């Protein structure tokens, strides 16, 4: 059964941080995307493509912008209940809010209910793929993958590994962590669209043995992800280096255990040294830039354009980092990415911004053969964006409605970064299927 | 005709930056506010007050929080059409987007349409009073006050005075500026709820003669406001001091012309010296803190807690500063105020935050005998806030729903700062009348 989606399409074929925007942005004013069995089989101008398909069930979205599904590179599903809790910096935040909340995920039913709510909220915000922290409990991972699989969403997730510096009720041991994670990988990794991330919380909460367990898992299953945190605050960095005195910087802690790989996602990276940027660049590891969270916890401003430089290009994606981030909306997160960059006197262009949550994220996560743009063969995850969903976006849109070209679409996208929220997301498609919300 | 509003009320009787929060926060879990002819005549517990009034038309809002109407201390109504325009810092922003847009307000019909749209958006966001820049055109002021008066909203506004360093089509002359402003003051100041602000744009766009015209107007009408900008960016400060070489700092430019008064509102003040803070404190002038705009233009982080210090307390209110601000919602602006402060390692408490947009703003603007809290005698401008308007606010509210006390209300207010937007505003009352939107 062939599905055709008709409307204005915009996606990327290259990186607008390093190429001219016009060269790497693809745009069809009246386009047609043809989907078969959840995969894209063709995209082009409606008038060129439509005649080739005699029986096509067409979903027509006039006056909408259709983009690849958004990708959230760092988020804690288990913190959705403490979003917007008051007044702490990172280490106190964990102790005061995060750990007591994560304790609740010992209950598989609670985990399942929260996973369900979380995933529906992602869909409501146009996010179709995310790299997700569960909790230390294997049942929190089972619940998450089970709900993600039910929705057929491409998700990366993993059980938190931590064996010190957190309340006893949240600790595992290196052996148990290894065994639990191994079983979860065997059960879930590449099960339909699910992907596993070995997830040591961060250096502070992991002994050398725990990190060695992570290393062993990565050796055993070379294509799994590594997902952790790095260099979010100065206090965290200092404490980490006290705990690993043999390491000369934070990244070396992870390097010592073979965790700095092309499949590694490091959240934050605000306070990395030039040498650490250089080594991340060489390893091809990803930094998840989490501006909402970084400002909320007062952690600092990530130097995005330093990471996206010719000198030492590091793959960068964007994370909402809920619960310390204050919104699951990647539109709102891009608003804060723009502001964080502006405070460093750099202007993140709208096309660069949307690249970061679509193809840029897919490339960073080594998923660009599957998702990230509308290339034939890829999975048909996409977002139908209504640029007129609220009175002010409607005002802005009406003023600049025509003609549609890359410049005007870029302006419309910037309006969405500044003013958009979940109301802008008219419809989200997962593998070619519209999702109701 | 007596109107009674029943629900949970919260307002302030003092300044939570300088007093214990419990001492200066007033709260009625099941309260009743009685209104006659647009003014509050009584507030208290429903059970205590209701029996005293035999015929009361009661508007009951269960599970809602009722707060004094929000006050926006700095906003440009004439920039609503360019909100969310891309990529400039202050001086280029003015040249590229602001001036061409403001030129349109030469047309009284356009001015009226935009004033109407702008005021309706304020109401939709719970803002009942604002200090507003119109444009250089008297017709833009007439249109604005006329629409504000039609809605019976208490507004402060004025014609921009500027006679240099902007396109010719937007310049006035000192004589014309004086005459136009004088006529506008005579027509509108204290006309029903309207209040006038003499509005020299800022030092760069005003010759000494133009500032002298402003000074003469303030002498002629001593109770009008002065509304201008100060110390938003380093480049602006440097250029201002080149233009006024006899002044040793930015504030001295305004001091030289008698414009630093208790009725003066200075937007931004990010880069003020200690001496300037001290002199603003002595003068009792107000700083309008505009975090959304300051981050959007990359101007910097206003040191809120330096202004709210015992050393040199300066009255502070919060401005959305649309168009450079990205939202008219003061809830969203407080989100950014929280983050800007967090980046300076200070935590703005939820009660402090709401003080800044209610009683704190009213005091700063010398309007606390009329608005800002629920004291009998004051005008009944208020906001009915729905703490469960979206799935995530609903989740947070349900988890912490009882018991209602100042601590739990403070938590609910923080949720609104983090997650709230126009959807949280269920109803806005102007002078005792519910406004439909």
Image: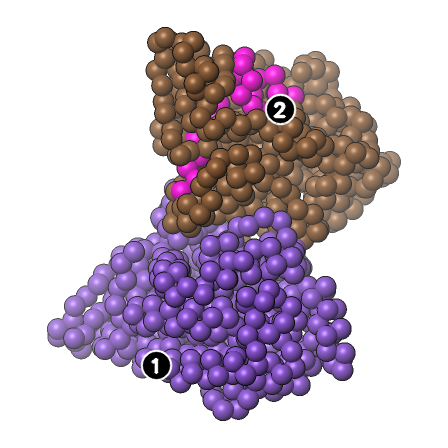
Chain colours: A brown, B purple
In the image, A313 versus B313, the foreground residue is A313
Q: Total number of numbered labels?
A: 2
Pinpoint residue A296: horizontal percent, then vertical percent: 59, 51
Q: Report in which chain the residue with disc 2 lies.
A: A
Whether A387 is drawn above or below B334: the answer is above
Q: Which residues are magenta?
A: A365-388
Relative to residue A258, is residue B326 drawn left or right?
A: left
Quadrant position of the N terminus of chain A in the picture: top left
The residue positioned 43% from the left and 68% from the top of the image is B140
**Residue A374 belongs to magenta span:** yes
**Residue A102 belongs to magenta span:** no
The lab-note entry on whether marks 2 and 1 share a chain reads no
Relative to residue B145, is residue B100 drawn left or right?
A: right
Pinpoint residue B91: horizontal percent, then vertical percent: 65, 61
Neighbours of disc 2 within 10 Å: few (<14), some (14-19), many (20+): some
The residue positioned 18% from the left and 77% from the top of the image is B52
The answer to whether any part of residue A297 appears in the image is: no
Residue at the outermost bottom position = B220
The residue positioned 36% from the left and 19% from the top of the image is A58
Please give the label number shown on residue A13.
Answer: 2
In the image, B373 versus B47, the foreground residue is B373
Pinpoint residue A311: horizontal percent, then vertical percent: 82, 35
**Residue designated by label 1:** B191
Residue at the outermost front position = B168
Q: Report in which chain the residue with disc 1 lies.
A: B
Pinpoint residue B260: horizontal percent, then vertical percent: 60, 83
């Amino acid at each position: 059964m062939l599905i055709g989606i008709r409307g204005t399409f915009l996606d990327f074929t290259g990186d607008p941080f390093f190429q001219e925007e016009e060269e790497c942005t693809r745009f069809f004013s009246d386009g047609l995307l043809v989907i078969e069995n959840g995969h894209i089989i063709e995209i082009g101008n409606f008038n060129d493509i439509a005649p080739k398909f005699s029986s096509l069930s067409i979903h027509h979205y006039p006056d909408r912008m259709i983009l690849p599904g958004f990708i959230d590179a760092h988020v804690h599903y288990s913190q959705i209940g403490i979003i917007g809790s008051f007044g702490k910096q990172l280490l106190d935040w964990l102790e005061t809010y995060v750990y007591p909340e994560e304790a609740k995920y010992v209950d598989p039913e609670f985990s399942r209910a929260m996973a369900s709510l979380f995933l529906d909220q992602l869909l409501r915000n146009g996010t179709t793929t995310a790299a997700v922290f569960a909790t230390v409990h294997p049942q929190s991972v089972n619940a998450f993958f089970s709900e993600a699989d039910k929705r057929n969403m491409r998700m990366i997730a993993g059980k938190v590994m931590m064996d010190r510096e957190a309340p006893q009720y949240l600790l595992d041991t290196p052996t148990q962590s290894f065994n639990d994670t191994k079983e979860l990988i065997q059960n879930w990794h590449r099960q339909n669209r699910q992907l596993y991330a070995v997830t040591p919380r961060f250096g502070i909460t992991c002994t050398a043995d725990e990190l060695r367990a992570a290393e062993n898992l990565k050796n055993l299953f070379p294509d799994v992800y590594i997902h952790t945190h790095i260099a979010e605050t100065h206090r965290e960095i200092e404490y980490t280096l006290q705990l690993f005195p043999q390491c000369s910087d934070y990244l070396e802690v992870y390097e010592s255990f073979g965790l700095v790989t092309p499949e590694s996602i490091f959240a934050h990276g605000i306070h990395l040294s030039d040498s650490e940027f250089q080594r991340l660049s060489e390893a091809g590891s990803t930094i998840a830039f989490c501006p909402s969270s970084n400002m909320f916890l007062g952690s600092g401003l990530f130097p995005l354009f330093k990471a996206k430089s010719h000198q030492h290009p590091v793959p960068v994606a964007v994370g909402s980092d809920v619960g310390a981030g204050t919104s699951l909306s990647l539109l709102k997160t891009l608003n804060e990415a723009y502001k964080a960059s502006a405070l460093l006197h750099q202007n993140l262009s709208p096309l660069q911004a949307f690249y970061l949550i679509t193809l840029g994220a897919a490339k960073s996560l080594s998923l660009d053969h599957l998702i990230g743009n509308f290339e034939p063969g890829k999975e048909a995850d996409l977002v139908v964006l209504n640029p007129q969903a609220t009175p002010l976006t409607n005002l802005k849109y009406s003023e600049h409605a025509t003609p549609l070209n890359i410049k005007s679409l870029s302006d419309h996208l910037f309006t969405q970064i500044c003013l958009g929220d979940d109301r802008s997301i008219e419809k989200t498609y997962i593998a070619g299927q519209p999702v109701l919300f």
